Image (tube, rainbow, N blue to C red):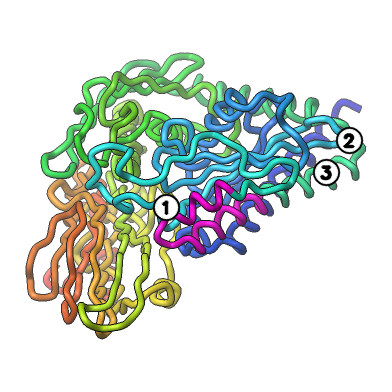
């Protein structure tokens, strides 16, 4: 009977994962913002009544999922359980209690069965605008970066807080999109709740206690077994990235013990005066993700499988305290996996991929008609990616978002949101670092305002002055480039202008190579030339 019980629990665990996957797909189907609908910049999960994550959807980003695992506990700390009712939905975009910046909206909803609280559902999505200076690094404090929503009720007993909706509409540039996304997030949690209750009714479950214990015990044991097989010791790594106007040094110390892997960011540069700072909740999310990718990639993500991975840091750019500006927290946060993997590469020589482009090359465009002309005003968000680092036995992936995992938006969907034309979007030859295995290629994107329009854009780019490093003798990837079609060089960060008749050209960086280039096989070199990944001269 014990064997049958275990099989049943495993089936129910898989069923729970399918519940949250349908929860996430609801958000994908109903979202208004292209960053959610087309790129998958979201997360969804189910939690027990104590706020511990039982399961997450595969759809979504590590930065959202792993921060959400901690964020739900903040909701429980703010809203007493005696003030929770059926039909409730709670919301925040607090960077330090949510997912790191104001553009991410986190919603949590209690799930009741027969009047008893049995679970919480949570989801997160990036909305197109939250007011303030817009999505960019130019703010000097979080107060400039947009509207702040403390943990509060979006709906109580099924009745939406109309005062909150009115405040939102009065503070954002795209009120219909933003408010629409709020309702999509609420619907996402509602679908999760309905599917969970269906599952519990079908299997005569009164609570998730037994299933939760099964999930946590198996996940914790499996993760600790993997950690026990790692070499024990302490390793350090540093890397320098572009920053805003001065380079930023990131540092980490990785400590592996019998039952814990600890990441410490001591030695990292201090808080920036610009909006590239990262709250610890987000730095921690990506540090844990990097370690888990190496140590336990096949163990489902939940509170127990994350528990042995711990993160510490003094106050610095990776642990920025309120009211530091944090709008572009993803730029530094996305560098954290490369930083941590560099330390792991010393513990596991020859097994860890090279550095890649890391931070997304996303761009926020604020388009408008030229002076004296009529036309469309619009806010357009577009996600682009450079190349990933080469792997010990495989080339890096071209134009692929690692570590975030978001998708590249289709050109047609992006052009539909505003008066812009994307004239070119193609792989960038010679951008992958040479090596026994080659770094992934970046891409070239050419964007222009539609006729009679101009636009300002927020540059959020890195690896322009400090390209991805190779590993074990592999060469650097190509640095990124930001310029106008006439050759005018632009800054990698900050709001800038593209006049009518000009085109913005982005050349996303490539990933670093792995191993000496002299060891690359002749057949691989020939294939690179045939596919246009490298020039004939190479």
Q: Earlier in the sequence, mark 3 or mark 1?
A: 1
Spatial CA span between label 3 and label 2: 10 Å
Residue receiving disc 2: 114
Q: Which quadrant holds residue 294?
A: top left
Residue drawn 13% across the image and 39% down it: 247
| 265 within the magenta span | no
Q: Position of residue 248 (x, y in %)?
A: 17, 36
Residue 276: % across, % down: 26, 41
- Residue 452 drawn at (x, y percent): 25, 84
Crowding near the residue tagged with mark 3, few <14, some 14–19, many ≥20 C-alpha atoms within 10 Å: some
Judged from the image, the secondary structure of the residue bearing numbered disc 1 is loop
Q: Residue at 45% of width from left, 73% of height from top?
A: 413
Q: Is residue 23 left or right of residue 200?
A: left
Question: Measured from the top left, where is residue 527 in percent x and y?
Answer: 29, 70
Cα–Cα gap, marks 1 and 2 = 40 Å
Q: Nearer the viewer, residue 283 or 255?
A: 283
Segment colored magenta: 163-188
**Residue at disc 2, secondary structure:** loop
Q: Give the residue at mark 1.
A: 171
Sooner in the amino-acid sequence: mark 3 or mark 2: 2
- Report, in whole angstroms, how far the alpha carbon at label 3 lies from the one at label 1: 37 Å
Residue 182 covered by magenta stretch: yes
Sequence-wise, the earlier of marks 1 and 2 is 2
- Residue 220 versus residue 460 in the image, above or below: above
| Res. 345 mark | none
Q: Secondary structure at mark 3?
A: helix
As drawn, the label of residue 197 is 3
Q: Nearer the viewer, mark 1 or mark 2?
A: 1
Classify residue 261 by image quadrant: top left
- Which residue occupies 37% across, 46% down? 146
């Amino acid at each position: 009977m014990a064997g049958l019980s275990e099989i049943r629990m495993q089936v129910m665990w898989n069923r729970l994962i399918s519940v949250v996957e349908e929860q996430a797909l609801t958000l994908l189907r109903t979202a208004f913002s292209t960053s959610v609908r087309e790129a998958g910049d979201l997360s969804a999960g189910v939690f027990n009544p104590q706020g511990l994550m039982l399961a997450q959807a595969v759809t979504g980003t590590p930065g959202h999922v792993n921060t959400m695992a901690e964020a739900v506990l903040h909701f429980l700390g703010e809203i007493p359980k005696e003030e929770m009712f059926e039909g409730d939905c709670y919301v925040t975009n607090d960077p330090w209690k949510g997912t790191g910046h104001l553009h991410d909206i986190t919603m949590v909803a209690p799930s009741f069965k027969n009047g008893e609280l049995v679970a919480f559902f949570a989801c997160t999505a990036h909305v197109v605008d939250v007011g303030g200076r817009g999505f960019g690094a130019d703010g000097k404090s979080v107060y400039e970066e947009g509207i702040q929503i403390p943990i509060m009720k979006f709906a109580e007993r099924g009745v939406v807080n109309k005062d909150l909706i009115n405040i939102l509409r009065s503070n954002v540039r795209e009120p219909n999109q933003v408010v629409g996304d709020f309702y999509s997030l609420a619907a996402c949690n509602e679908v999760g709740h309905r599917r969970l209750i269906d599952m519990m009714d079908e299997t005569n479950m009164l609570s998730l206690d037994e299933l939760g214990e099964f999930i946590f015990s198996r996940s914790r044991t499996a993760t600790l077994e993997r950690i026990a097989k790692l070499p024990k010791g302490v390793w350090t790594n540093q890397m320098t990235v572009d920053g805003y106007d001065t380079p930023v040094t990131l540092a980490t110390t990785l400590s592996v013990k019998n039952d814990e892997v600890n990441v410490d960011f001591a030695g990292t540069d201090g808080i920036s005066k610009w909006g590239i700072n990262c709250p610890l909740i987000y730095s921690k999310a990506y540090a844990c993700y990097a370690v888990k990718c190496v140590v336990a990639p096949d163990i489902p993500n939940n509170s127990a499988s994350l528990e042995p991975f711990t993160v510490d840091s003094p106050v610095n750019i990776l642990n920025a305290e309120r009211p530091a500006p944090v709008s572009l927290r993803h730029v530094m946060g996305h560098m954290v996996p490369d930083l941590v993997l560099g330390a792991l590469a010393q513990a596991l020589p020859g097994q860890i991929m090279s550095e890649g482009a890391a931070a997304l090359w996303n761009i926020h465009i604020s388009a408008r008609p030229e002076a004296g002309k009529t036309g469309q005003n619009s806010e357009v968000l577009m996600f682009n990616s450079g190349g990933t680092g080469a792997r010990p036995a495989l080339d890096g992936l071209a134009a692929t978002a690692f570590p975030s995992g978001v998708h590249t938006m289709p050109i047609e969907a992006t052009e539909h949101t505003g008066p812009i034309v994307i004239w070119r979007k193609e792989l960038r030859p010679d951008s992958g670092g040479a090596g026994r295995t080659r770094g992934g290629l970046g891409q070239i994107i050419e964007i222009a305002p539609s006729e009679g329009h101009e636009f300002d854009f927020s540059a959020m780019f890195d690896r322009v002055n400090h390209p991805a490093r190779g590993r074990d003798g592999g060469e650097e990837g190509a640095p990124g480039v930001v310029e106008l079609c006439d050759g005018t060089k632009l800054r990698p960060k900050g709001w800038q202008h593209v006049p009518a008749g000009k085109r913005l050209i982005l050349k996303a960086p490539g990933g670093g190579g792995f191993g000496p280039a002299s060891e690359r096989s002749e057949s691989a070199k020939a294939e690179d030339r045939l596919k246009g990944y490298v020039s004939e001269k190479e």
